[in-house]
Amino acid sequence: MQFISAQRFDDDVVEREFTIGEISGVLWTPASTATPTPLILLGPPPLGLRKSYPRLLGRARHAVAGGYSAAAIELPGSGDRPRNAIVDQAVADLHRALAAGEPVTDDIVDRLILPLLDPAISEWRTTLDALLALPEIGGPVGYSGGVISIGTRLAVVEPRVEAAVLFAGSYVPRTIFEEARRVTIPLHVLLQWDDEGNDRQMALDLFDAFGSKEKTLHANMGGHTGVPHYAGEAADSFFTRHLR
Amino acid sequence: MQFISAQRFDDDVVEREFTIGEISGVLWTPASTATPTPLILLGPPPLGLRKSYPRLLGRARHAVAGGYSAAAIELPGSGDRPRNAIVDQAVADLHRALAAGEPVTDDIVDRLILPLLDPAISEWRTTLDALLALPEIGGPVGYSGGVISIGTRLAVVEPRVEAAVLFAGSYVPRTIFEEARRVTIPLHVLLQWDDEGNDRQMALDLFDAFGSKEKTLHANMGGHTGVPHYAGEAADSFFTRHLR
């Protein structure tokens, strides 16, 4: 793990960009802390770290203010990384289907999500190894955000992730519904009820499928990017219960 | 309004039973308060005040600890009040349909809820007149609990109710879906995802129908009576935002 930049904000949040091989990411930690912090992995929107940076930074500073460290990595095919032709074609097909008022087929959803899933999970796990080796980061670890399929699989395969706030703002391949039944960690699922980039019934079906004994769905108005501030506060309470 | 009993608990909550004509109810207020309190109307489960008293008292003391007064009234046909034969028959038909795995028809749901609706609303409004005339109670007023059809209609017809936490734990007549579109106050809807006394899709459809610009759905596990404590805390935050 190599740190390639560092800056300190007024609120004593230290932001460091890092690389681990071809993985690139950002880590936010408190400028000083008496004990190693728990860690929240921020699932970035598929727009890429740079485009989503302002919102990501807001979430990260909020997390650090709450006593956590936070990290995000560039998804495969996002930002400056080589595009994934299959996913790009699926995005185009998705937009065409939505514009034509046609159903979004399983085939489109599979091509949209599945090619990213294995590399994203693998890179999160490598990143987690590196982050947990830092003296300022202890645990436990939570995952927060989208892509919900990534969060779901990470919850199944990565025992170090102990709780997850999942943002139901993306399409979900059928295979993920099967995996969802194997999730047992506490889940807090956020759904924007009239999300224009989502399928509400799919999100409700996925929530239903999760095997977790403790799972909560918070649905709000305001469109894909309009998550109200009090939804964030409820998610804070969830992490406080499970990571502190 | 006549107070027919009074007792003071260790936590300085004063509980008074009251009657207003044939209406009977319970009022919980702080033993002393510098300014008139906002008021939360507790929608009681249809079991009746006496059977639901322990849970109701818990909710009331929690409300008073938060700086509110709280009140509940006996639903028509509940507790010691004369039974409603139409509703009783509908309850029997409902149980028979559920036991037989048959669909719960609109006819059953209408007979289950509609006969109670007009008198319940009328009695809540009369009670509200009396409560708001007390010096220790100011406003604003919130409604919290079931029966969700009662809460919905009250939100439409009673402008003094400014925010509502609605418990989606009962069947909903079709006519209420129409009324739901006319609700504009902020809503916080609680749904027990695997509620055995409810129809989940009906609850989701009702949430969708509400006309309120601010509406939030919190779905949790644990069955009809298993609302987790953190769901109560989220409802507290909602009332804090809107009634304080």
Image: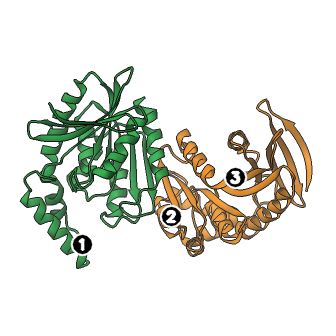
Chain colours: A green, B orange
- Label 2 vs label 1: CA separation? 24 Å
Residue shown at the point (44%, 48%) measured from the top left: A232
**Numbered tag placed on residue B102 in the rendering:** none
Please report, as a chain letter, where disc 1 is located.
A
Q: Nearer the viewer, mark 3 or mark 1?
A: 1
The residue tagged with tag 3: helix, strand or loop? loop
Residue shown at the point (40%, 37%) measured from the top left: A11
From the image, tell me which residue sits under label 1. Answer: A103
Q: Earlier in the sequence, mark 2 or mark 3?
A: 3
Residue A43 horizontal/vertical position (percent): 27, 46
Q: Quadrant of the N terminus of chain A?
A: top left
From the image, tell me which residue sits under label 3. Answer: B44
Above/below status of B146 relative to A29? below
Residue shown at the point (28%, 58%) measured from the top left: A170
Label 2 sits on what residue type? Phe
Label 3 sits on what residue type? Pro
Residue extending farthest to the bottom is A100
- Label 3 vs label 1: CA separation? 43 Å
The residue tagged with tag 1: helix, strand or loop? loop
As rendered, which of A213 and B212 lies closer to the eye? B212
The residue tagged with tag 2: helix, strand or loop? helix
Q: Is residue A97 left or right of residue B189?
A: left
**Numbered tag placed on residue B207 in the rendering:** 2
Do the numbered discs 3 and 1 sit on residues whose CB atoms are within 8 Å?
A: no
Label 1 sits on what residue type? Pro
